[in-house]
Image (cartoon, rainbow, N blue to C red):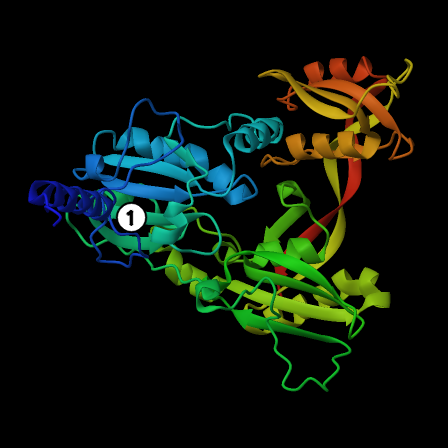
């Protein structure tokens, strides 16, 4: 007859109970949260720019804004200085935490370091930055970045676009007042991927579109940006734009780069309807009336004519609803003229092609094409609100590679000229006729 040791059994049961208890209580249940839900005390993993541990429970006395971002999101990067400024203004009452669950630390550091060449002053920021922790995507599901989650007094109070993060909105939340924070909708969460699906859906598979275009009112669920696609089945090249202000659509149609502010002349009474407003406190009502989505499909053989057709579409549509049109005019401007200098061109064909920041004030454009160097000058000079344009009169092959060490501040004419001279180029002041996009009111 076997003797049962009840103490051993009791001890075993107690051990199993403790194991089960620890599994249940060691980590809060993970599920997607909605506005109004209590937020569990979860810790941020893989933190940069922060010493020690950090969890949501430690921040229960502060307003928390989680900023989801990626290095492939230009608007995320450009917003970093503004977020840093908000953190300073509301120190002790606000905590902004950047979360990048998609990328590893090494990739983030490498990509953002390269961006500093194009965006002086942008780095990994002073804000806590959590990377590679996918749990946050489960708790706060979303499609597209930037994406903000607002948490106050252990409650999720808003899921918004980044432009809702303003000084006024933050002050109202901290004061217990109602802030007009719009809820961001993501169609992808409903199973509809706007980047993979057409804005226009064919009614039947047998319908073979040959040529089409259409405009749509704004829809937060689309996100922003645009995409292009070759439809080999129907022989179409398709271009799409999502929730873009009027000025962005016209720039795309007329081949104006985003940074070329001085290549556009706005000559309409209601110019504020063309751009994203500087005051983001009432941006949602502006967004509804002044952002548009657009899709155009043309035969692949006519791909090079797409911009021309888009220009016609924009003028036809906006002449109806905004009484405006866009045209190209050649006008006289003060210019800086890029020319071939007297010395030998600094060619280094045996060197690798790279952009390298020598110091915070100087960049080495090593073994770069003339076209790339000219575009860098355009970016640095014409991204400022002044009349100066830069024109290329070097007569050099645009694909010829040169090495030039240039100042980050390209508005210092003498310093810029000296650096170009060292590479066999020069720059002169003068006046030239330059094509500019004119958006003007249609005369009745």
Measuring 38% from the left and 36% from the top, which residue is drawn there? 83
> How crowded is the residue under tag 1: few (<14 C-alpha within 10 Å), some, or many (20+)?
many
Left-right relation of 416 to 39? right
Q: Quadrant of residue 370?
A: top right
Q: Which residue is mark 1?
A: 150
Left-right relation of 106 to 354? left
Measuring 63% from the left and 85% from the top, which residue is drawn there? 203
The percent coordinates of residue 56 (x first, y second) are 25, 39
Q: Is residue 9 visible?
A: yes
- Identify which residue, 230 or 132, lies in the foreground: 132
Farthest-out residue, left:
7
- Identify which residue, 66 or 302, lies in the foreground: 66
- Identify which residue, 367 or 317, lies in the foreground: 367
Left-right relation of 291 to 428? left
Left-right relation of 197 to 23? right
The percent coordinates of residue 395 (x first, y second) are 92, 32
Farthest-out residue, front:
1
Q: Quadrant of residue 319?
A: bottom right
Q: How many marks?
A: 1
- For numbered disc 1, what is the local secondary structure? strand
Q: Is residue 444 visible?
A: no
Residue 418 vertical position relative to residue 287 in the rendered view, above or below: above
The percent coordinates of residue 371 (x first, y second) are 81, 35
Residue 339 vertical position relative to residue 177 in the rendered view, above or below: above
Residue 2 vertical position relative to residue 269 in the rendered view, above or below: above
The percent coordinates of residue 423 (x first, y second) are 82, 16
Image quarter hosting the C terminus:
bottom right
């Amino acid at each position: 007859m076997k003797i049962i040791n009840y103490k051993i059994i009791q001890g075993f049961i107690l051990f199993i109970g403790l194991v089960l208890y620890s599994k249940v209580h060691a980590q809060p249940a993970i599920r997607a949260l909605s506005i109004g839900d209590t937020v569990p005390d979860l810790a941020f993993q893989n933190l940069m720019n922060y010493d020690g541990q950090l969890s949501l429970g430690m921040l229960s006395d502060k307003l928390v804004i989680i900023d989801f971002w990626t290095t492939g999101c230009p608007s995320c990067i450009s917003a970093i200085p503004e977020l840093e400024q908000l953190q300073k203004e509301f120190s002790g009452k606000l905590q902004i935490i950047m979360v990048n669950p998609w990328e590893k630390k090494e990739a983030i550091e490498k990509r953002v370091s390269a961006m500093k060449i194009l965006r002086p002053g942008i780095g990994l920021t002073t804000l806590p930055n959590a990377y590679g922790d996918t749990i946050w995507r489960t708790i706060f599901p979303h499609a597209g970045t930037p994406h903000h989650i607002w948490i106050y007094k252990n409650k999720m109070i808003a899921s918004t676009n980044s432009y809702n993060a303003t000084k006024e909105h933050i002050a109202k939340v901290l004061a217990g007042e109602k802030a007009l924070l719009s809820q961001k909708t993501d169609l992808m969460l409903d199973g509809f991927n706007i980047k993979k699906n057409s804005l226009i859906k064919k009614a039947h598979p047998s319908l073979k579109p040959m040529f089409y275009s259409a405009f749509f009112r704004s829809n937060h669920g689309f996100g922003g940006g645009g995409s292009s696609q070759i439809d080999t089945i129907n022989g179409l090249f398709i271009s799409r734009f999502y929730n873009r202000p009027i000025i962005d659509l016209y720039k795309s149609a007329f081949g104006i780069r985003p940074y070329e502010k001085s290549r556009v002349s706005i000559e309409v009474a209601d110019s504020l309807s063309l751009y994203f407003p500087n005051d983001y406190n009432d941006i949602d009502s502006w967004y509804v009336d002044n952002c548009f989505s657009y899709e155009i499909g043309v035969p692949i053989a006519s791909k090079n004519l797409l911009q021309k057709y888009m220009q016609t579409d924009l003028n036809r549509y906006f002449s109806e609803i905004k009484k405006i049109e866009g045209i190209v005019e050649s006008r006289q401007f003060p210019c800086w003229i890029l020319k071939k200098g007297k010395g030998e061109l600094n060619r280094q064909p045996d060197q690798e092609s790279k952009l390298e920041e020598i110091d915070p004030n100087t960049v080495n454009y090593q073994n770069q094409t003339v076209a790339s160097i000219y575009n860098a000058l355009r970016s640095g000079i014409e991204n400022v609100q002044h009349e100066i344009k830069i024109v290329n009169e070097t007569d050099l092959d645009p694909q010829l590679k040169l090495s030039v060490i240039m100042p980050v501040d390209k508005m210092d004419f003498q310093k810029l000229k000296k650096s170009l001279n060292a590479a066999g180029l020069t720059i002169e002041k003068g006046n030239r006729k330059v094509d500019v996009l004119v958006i003007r009111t249609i005369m009745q």
